Amino acid sequence: MTTQRVRVQLDRVPETLLWTLYYRAIEARRPDTVLRDPLAVELVDRIDFPFEERFGAGRGLSQWQSLRARCFDDTIRRFLAARERGTVVALGEGLETQFWRVDNGRVRWLTVDLPEVVELRARLLPNAPRMSSVACSALDGRWLDEVDASRGVLVTAQGLLMYLAPNEVHGLIARTAGRFPGGALV
């Protein structure tokens, strides 16, 4: 059975989710990879998008991108080792496939991303019972009400904060820290 390719058209900041996905997939294809990410490889193969034409061959950058993702994976694994039923909130997650790399079978995962990105994730990624999404900007505080903080919270902002103004970053961090005392942000 042939899998139909999915056409994806994004621009500006949302398009960067394709860049990070592509570079993780390039690195994941290497036999000596620093990041096993078979889902990233599968997604790049399924998406109808001129990755190489748009982003280049990826030499060098793919390993850097994958090392960054691996650092986040390691931090999440340490959090889950201490709080196995904790909640991870991934702000601006894009097409990151981290949940499937770090899932311990108990984590609750909340993706917070722009509506067009949440819709794309729903079309492309496997359904996971302990995973949910809120379609809004990370700056929109309504996602805070969706977080089950009873078993610990780790908020990730992998590659998001650089797109925000300094006062927006400070406000986001302050709101998150005020809402989840004892939580962590990476």
Image (cartoon, rainbow, N blue to C red):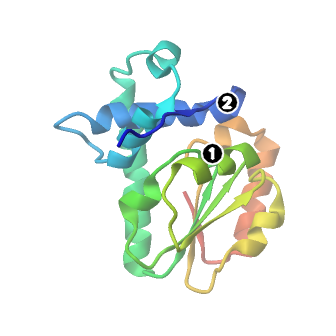
Q: Are marks 1 and 2 in contact (CB under 8 Å)?
A: yes
Q: Is residue 65 visible?
A: yes
Up-down relation of residue 120 to residue 83 (above or below): above
User: Residue tagged by mark 1?
Assistant: 120
Mark 2: few, some, or many residues within 10 Å (few <14, many ≥20)? Answer: few
Foreground pick, 17 / 39: 39
Horizontal and vertical percent for residue 17? Answer: 57, 37
Q: Is residue 157 visible?
A: no
Q: Secondary structure at mark 2?
A: loop
Q: Amino acid at mark 2?
A: Leu
Which residue is outermost to the front?
1
Foreground pick, 144 / 111: 111
Instruction: Indicate which disc, 1 or 2, sits on the residue closer to the N terminus.
Output: 2
Q: Secondary structure at mark 1?
A: helix
Horizontal and vertical percent for residue 154? Answer: 56, 68
The quadrant the N terminus occupies is top left
User: Residue tagged by mark 2?
Assistant: 10
Q: Amino acid at mark 1?
A: Leu
Identify which residue is drawn at 51% across, 28% down.
Answer: 48
The quadrant the C terminus occupies is bottom right
Up-down relation of residue 84 to residue 30 (above or below): below
Rounded to the nearest angstrom, the CA distance separating label 1 from label 2 is 10 Å
Horizontal and vertical percent for residue 13? Answer: 68, 32
Which residue is outermost to the bottom?
150
Horizontal and vertical percent for residue 185? Answer: 59, 61
In the figure, is residue 161 to the left or right of 63?
Answer: right
